[in-house]
């Protein structure tokens, strides 16, 4: 748990507000790609978690089954226990969900096909740029030696070229890690 | 409960299989048999638990190929809609399927299905990790997983460039976002406030 602030000025509430804003700004479908921004906010700006803990929470969220945005729940857990985890998950799912619901309920037919195409095609390169940023930030922090960098490159090639389920790659990564191959 | 998309929509999301454009044989605005909230909850729970590293491919296999609950066109249309809307795409997708099927209750059931079990599972795994992070073996295993995850993210980013138009504007936006957000680490909201509207405007001009 992280102490500090009173009322709505506590870390968990600041995190929730940030998560709600970010979840609305998540374009092209992913909250995972906002990882560099959350890292900046939590580790660098506020120092609520160590960088190693943040990377760990993020990696577990990617490796566990289910939607990978749930790593925010682990961040929430770190700040305020189970309640924090629950609130963090709600903060990224419910507010945008309400908007989607309202559009489905009242306005879907008014969202023109042209608008949707412009959104989808226009934002595709922006989303790709965010994803690449995210890949760069992640790799530059975890690839601390040439062996780790080599493993990352192999994973890129395998995932890009084959249809192998990523879970096997993650499992192999855990084994290589335990064998002491990627760590310094 | 009022039918979600009963009005004849002039310009909805891709018309062919869209429930928004009722065709002969559609079930009360739906183009598929009603699934119901309880089955939505169960189906989406199953989808999400096998969905290591991204739920979408599993959702497609279950809903379209194995159970034949949705047509290919309905799936694509609803997934594209989930991506265009703000927020996590997979949750938006589940919400859309649930809503079109069973209204508000269906929407809640589908989203709860996607989120609940993985949330609890991740908490258990996370608590286990943070309790044992002082063990070298545990830390090393996680480092290995993080190294692989970094590679997976880069691979997904490369795949994302395959589906987009590769013209000068697109490359300019992609490189601009990468330099400012990735390398310079400028605040996300500042980057997206410029890149988002610019990207939309450039693309809007090209649409008919």
Image: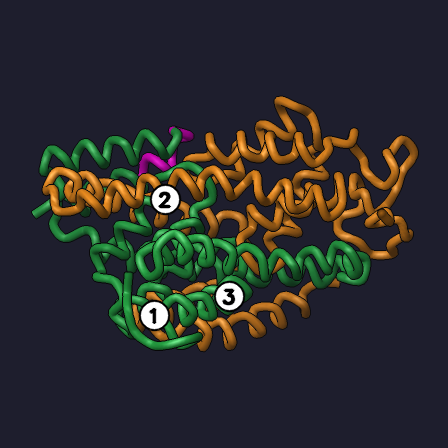
Chain colours: A green, B orange
The location of residue B106, given as percent across then percent down, is 70, 42
Q: How crowded is mark 1: few (under 14 residues within 10 Å), some or many (20 or more)?
A: some
Residue farthest to the top, as pictured:
B66
Residue B175 is inside the magenta segment: no
Q: Is mark 3 on a helix, strand or loop?
A: helix
Q: What stretch is highlighted in magenta?
A: A157-164
Mark 2 lies on residue: B123
Q: Residue at x 30, y 74 (%)?
A: A4
- Observer-side mark, 2 or 3, equals 2
Circle 2 chain: B
Mark 1 lies on residue: A41
Q: Residues within 10 Å of mark 2 (few under 14, many from 20)?
A: many
Circle 1 chain: A
| Residue A81 lies in quadrant | bottom left
Q: Residue at x 36, y 64 (%)?
A: A38
Mark 3 lies on residue: A20
**In this view, A7 is above or below A119:** below
Q: Which of B49 and B69 is in front in this view?
A: B49
Left or right placement of residue B182 versus residue B118 in this view: left
Q: For the stretch drawn in magenta, what is the main secondary structure?
A: helix
């Amino acid at each position: 748990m992280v102490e500090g602030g009173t009322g709505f000025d506590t870390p968990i509430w600041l995190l929730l507000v940030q998560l709600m804003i970010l979840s609305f700004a998540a374009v092209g479908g992913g909250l995972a790609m906002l990882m560099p921004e959350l890292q900046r906010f939590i580790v660098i700006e506020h120092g609520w978690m160590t960088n190693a803990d943040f990377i760990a929470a993020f990696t577990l969220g990617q490796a566990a089954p289910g939607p990978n945005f749930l790593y925010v729940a682990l961040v929430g857990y770190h700040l305020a226990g189970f309640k924090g985890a629950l609130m963090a998950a709600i903060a990224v799912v419910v507010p945008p969900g309400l908007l989607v619901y309202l559009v489905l309920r009242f306005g879907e037919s008014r969202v023109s096909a042209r608008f949707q195409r412009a959104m989808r095609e226009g934002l595709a390169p922006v989303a790709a740029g965010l994803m690449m940023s995210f890949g760069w930030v992640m790799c530059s922090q975890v690839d601390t030696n040439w062996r780790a960098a080599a493993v990352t490159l192999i994973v890129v090639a395998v995932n890009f070229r084959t249809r192998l389920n990523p879970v096997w790659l993650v499992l192999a990564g855990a084994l290589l890690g335990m064998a002491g191959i990627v760590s310094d | 409960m009022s039918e979600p998309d009963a009005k004849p929509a002039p310009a909805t999301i891709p018309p062919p299989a869209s429930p928004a454009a009722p065709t002969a044989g559609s079930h009360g605005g739906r183009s598929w048999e009603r699934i119901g909230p309880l089955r939505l909850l169960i189906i989406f729970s199953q989808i999400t638990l096998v969905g290591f590293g991204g739920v979408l491919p599993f959702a497609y296999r279950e809903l379209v190929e194995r159970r034949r609950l949705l047509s290919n066109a309905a799936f694509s249309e609803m997934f594209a809609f989930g991506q265009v809307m703000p927020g996590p795409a997979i949750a938006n997708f589940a919400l859309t399927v649930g809503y079109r099927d069973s209204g508000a209750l269906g929407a809640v059931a589908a989203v709860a299905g996607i989120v609940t079990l993985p949330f609890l599972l991740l908490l258990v795994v996370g608590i286990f990790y943070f309790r044992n992070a002082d063990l070298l073996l545990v830390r090393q295993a996680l480092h290995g997983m993080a190294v692989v995850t970094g590679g997976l993210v880069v691979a997904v980013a490369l795949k994302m460039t395959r589906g987009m138009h590769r013209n000068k504007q697109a490359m300019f936006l992609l490189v601009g976002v990468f330099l400012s957000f990735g390398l310079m680490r400028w605040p996300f909201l500042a980057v997206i406030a410029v890149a988002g509207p610019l990207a939309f405007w450039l693309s809007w001009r090209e649409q008919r």
